[in-house]
Amino acid sequence: MLRRALILLAACHASPAPPRAVEPITIERDDWGIAHVHGATDADAVFGMIYAQAEDNFSQIENNYLAALGRLAEADGEAAIWQDLRARMFLDPERLRRDYAASPAPLRTLMDAWADGLNQFLVDHPAVKPRVLVRFEPWMALAFTEGSIGADLEGISVDKLAAFYGEKHASQVEPADPTGSNGIAIAPRNTRDGHSLLLINPHTALFFRSELQMTSDEGLDAYGAVTWGQFFVYQGFNARVGWMHTSSGVDAVDEWAETIEHRGDELVYRHGTELRPVEQRTITLSYRTRDGGLAQRTITTYRTHHGPIVRSTDGKWIATNLMVKPIEALSQSYLRTKATDLAGFRAAMKNRANSTNNTIYADADGHVAYFHPQFIPVRDDRFDWTKPVDGSDPATDWRGEHGVDDPPHVLDPAVGWVMNTNNHPYSAAGPDSPRREAFPRYMDRFGETPRGWNALRVLTGAKGWTLDSLRDAAYDPYLPLFEKLVPRLLASARDLPPAYAEPLVLLRTWDLRWSTESIPTTLAVFWGMMLLEQTPDPELAKVNLFDRYARDVDARKLVDAWVAAVERLSKDFGTWRMRWGDVNRFQRATDFSDAAPSIAVPFTASMWGSLAAFGARTGATEKKLYGVKGNSFVAVVELGPRVRARAIMAGGASADPTSKHFADQALRYTRGELRDVYFYPDQRVGKIERRYQISSWSARRQAIPQHRLPR
């Protein structure tokens, strides 16, 4: 696998005429503050793009790497020790250093440029004071190789980990709102102009990614959403190929219930007829003390051949295993951005180091595809892998990995489109989707979703697609979950007192569509919120909401939640007659305030089936809802002879509240008004606010004295 990565990376760095090493890196900031970075080499482009990212939001870059490296407690104090322990149990810094040394030379060069770019930013901006990471080292890039921070790790409970290793830990739990993303690709036969179209619509924390372009004379030319601190475009496009990732329901993280015994002073666990020794490893973690100093804590951890022990249940120790392939993962993430056709994209997939993401693909040759994740362990499908399996049974061991072509992919379906909304792959192309019965059950845990139903409704039978109509589909206001819920409420809520029956009348005639002027939307969403509060489910993000709330919830609870919603609206606002836009607000702030300026948002949280997503919550004293996650980046792309694209991001390109680009996209964001993307230099003529150059990475690396780097 590493040999393949080496060959692919070397090929991607090949250039017919070696560029001049002294050519400076150019950064152009367009009239939205978005960085367009060009370097002679890919390494120069990486140096420049991470430098530009740091200009926009260094604090988020540092926070992301503190989390990935297991060093949050060094900034946030001892309470973060357990989150750090979780990270360090799977990603050991010493192993990452060894992996860096063993990486293909072209990949090491990119990591070197990445670290040097961040360190040079700190040299050039002495007013920026890192909380912990005063110097970045190249190997650190291997700690954060996919587009989501610890996506596999997040399923491991920090509370239960802390309880197992000796301490009760109280974590903050946000209101439940399953996150996700939407991707749609339309084949040329279904478009007006005969070119492939792609919708890129990640649903994450609103300010989780930047937007930029990175180009080089070595063939790099990628545009799109970049997770703060990474050196590759995670969701985006180049001149020929576009890609969108959505969180997958594939089962790629498993748990084993281990039978632990004592043999004298030794801990052992049963595996078949064997008793094997439990491995022990001490992990030393630093944490910030109240007086600002640093202290350390050493914890002895345990593991079996299945993986680290992360909790106990019913007398069994629970081991967890997941993908740990940092070299291959970083290679795949970068290589896909340089693919110029389907063959090149699939070649990057052969690293088999994508465990969490489905991919919606489109290209200028007219291909569209749905790709399931490529890291999928082979298992015995007799077992229920959604729960811990018996670790003493050798039949539960992983049996290698599935090949790249094993999962349920879809390529160029006759229906002319593919989509994914974090639902199962078995509706990815409507009637041309893979058949569920042809694949192991562990290929998907999510099933269908409300957004999946909505996407099928929007796509089925539609022709003549354009960028405009694809944008309209992305903001279709229909809320299909309420199509299931409302009739049940109406049938159950008989003989209600007038105070609760009167607002119910509005639901009877509601068109099930959101808008800023809609009072029924407010009633329905608050009713849903009360229903969630009254029927808590810690596994909410993993269940099918159609089944959980539209069919299985007791009718009495539906009515009780309705009464609670009307009462809450009346108490908080003096009336239940609240327009949705007066309640659902966008405010780019650390601390929300009903007294501060904010903007009405028409779309709702994705759990109700809205394709456009705006997950919002109240604060300690606020009555209105303020967005925290959902549509973080939206782009529609036409992949023809010349790429055309439009995009929007939450708020603006800069995290600096004093910048004109802190919230200059906010109003457009709330209205779904996408702006033109300046992909080609001629599109940026007259649109550049600032153009500046920094010396090439090769020249700068030689010129940076080690004593000038921050320590």
Image (tube, rainbow, N blue to C red):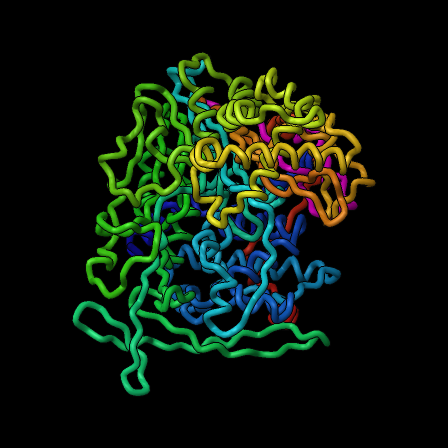
Q: Quadrant of the C terminus?
A: bottom right
| Residue found at the very far right of the displayed protein | 595
- Main SS class of the magenta portion in the image: loop
- The outermost residue toward the front is 495
Residue ID at (50%, 43%): 233
209 sits to left or right of 238: right
Give the quarter of the image for residue 266.
bottom left
In the rendered image, residue 344, in percent from the top left (x then y), is placed at: 34, 38
In the image, is residue 418 part of the stretch drawn in magenta? no
Residue 450 in the image: above or below residue 190: below
- How many marks the image carries: the answer is 0
Q: Residue at x 43, y 67 (%)?
A: 89
- Looking at the image, the residue that sits furthest to the left is 273
Is residue 294 visible in the rendered image? The answer is yes
Looking at the picture, tell me which residue is in the foreground, 16 or 318: 318
Vertical side of 464 occupied by 49: above or below: below
Give the side of residue 176 with respect to residue 402, left or right. Answer: right
Image point (56%, 64%), residue name: 136
Where residue 389 appears, as percent x and y from the top left, is 29, 57
Quarter holding residue 124: bottom right
Of 640 and 549, which appears nearest the observer? Answer: 549
Question: Which residue range is magenta in the image?
Answer: 641-670
Q: Is residue 643 magenta?
A: yes
Residue, x 45% and y 37% (percent of image)? Answer: 548
In the visual, does 561 lie left or right of 446?
A: right
Q: Does any portion of residue 135 appear in the rendered image?
A: no
